[in-house]
Image (tube, rainbow, N blue to C red):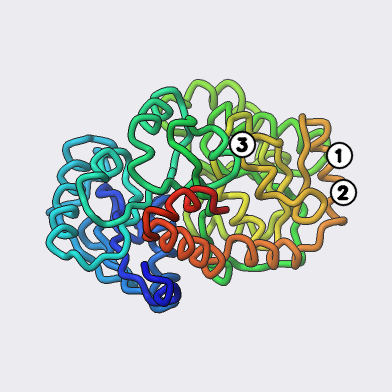
Amino acid sequence: MAPNQADAPLRIAMLAPPWIRVPAPAYGGIEEVVRLLCEGLVERGHAVTLFAAPESQSAADVHVVLDAEHPDEIQKAQFEADHVARAFAEIDRDSGFDVVHDHTGHVALSMADRIAAPFVHTLHGPFDAAASSFYAEHGSKALLVALSEHQRSQAPVQAGEIAVVPNPLRVEEWPFRADKEDFVAWVGRMSPDKGPHRAIAAARAAGVPLVLAGPVQPGQEEYFAREVEPQIDGDAVRYPGEADAEAKRDLYAAARALLMPIRWPEPFGLVMVEAMACGTPVIAYPEGAAPELVLDGETGFLVDGEDEMAAAIGRLDEIDPRRCRSATEARFGVDAVTRGYEEVYRRAAAPPADASAARSIV
């Protein structure tokens, strides 16, 4: 891109996964990111073409290339490859795109060097052994974007330097409450790494009621039956089940704090940002991206162990709910994240002489 075009509107091809429409009818983390990013980019004057599943709706110009959604066949290569190939064909026919932004799994990145437009790929998952091997081979075909510094630190060196832009949240869509009810909350999958049993222990030690919300997914039944269900008494520990979007918002807004006793390297942790948007502090273990999301002593507390978590529950009056919300808007609001991606796009589209600089954006 020429220097005098540095502030010009961009033409962006946005590749959503093929499995679920945008916005998702229920849970859809990547689809929510795509929805908000498209809205933010269009609001800032960019022309966005969204390649997404059937029945998708967006502020962007939606292009549907498959005949049906495939919510029960997520990660089946046939449908991802079909979706990507058809989108690539349209992108090739229209040579006017300044950048392609990919949110699919692996197929598009592996073939990114087959199209002329600069390519940006957001990392939506952790770097396990298989993912590390894949990105070592194919990561250099695009400008990669991590969701956190922690996620970036886990990338193989062969992928090169990687930009960091967090997931967005439209804060005004989340209800704010300064007056909290007398309980703390835990939200997530009923799995040992998410730690609902640790949240129960911390809340009991603090003498504060706990409300759990989240699904028991296939393979988690035994853990739930052994570690969680026996402690649900409808009083000290309540479990209303998997909260829908409205119930989750109400839960976040009313709780004194969200407990996050995770024991795995979570790349981001959107539930923490959602809670803070509602003015609810987060008490989290310092795993994965949590130390980057929670400002210790300002929007919550970072602790290590149930005893420290219980002690932090006793310090919640030190946290200003309004600061939780304002800090979330400033750091993770749609406008802040959109501006971050604008810089990524312009760097990706820069002449080759500037390409090395593109990989150190934060």
Amino acid at circle 1? Ala
Q: Dot 3: few (<14), some (14–19), or many (≥20) neighbours within 10 Å?
A: many
* Front residue of this view, candidates 76 and 261: 76
Residue on which disc 1 sits: 311
* Front residue of this view, candidates 192 and 56: 56
Amino acid at circle 3? Gly
Q: Quadrant of residue 199?
A: top right
User: Residue at 23% across / 54% down in the picture?
Assistant: 116
Residue on which disc 2 sits: 315
Whichever of labels 2 and 3 marks the residue nearer the N terminus, that label is 3
CB under 8 Å between discs 1 and 2: yes
The N terminus: image quadrant: bottom left
Real-space Cα separation, disc 3 to disc 1, in angstroms: 22 Å
Residue 237 at what x, y percent from top left?
68, 39
144 is higher (above) or lower (below) than 253:
above
77 is higher (above) or lower (below) than 271:
above
User: Residue at 59% across / 30% down in the picture?
Assistant: 264
Q: Dot 1: few (<14), some (14–19), or many (≥20) neighbours within 10 Å?
A: some
Real-space Cα separation, disc 2 to disc 3, in angstroms: 24 Å
Front: mark 3 or 1: 3
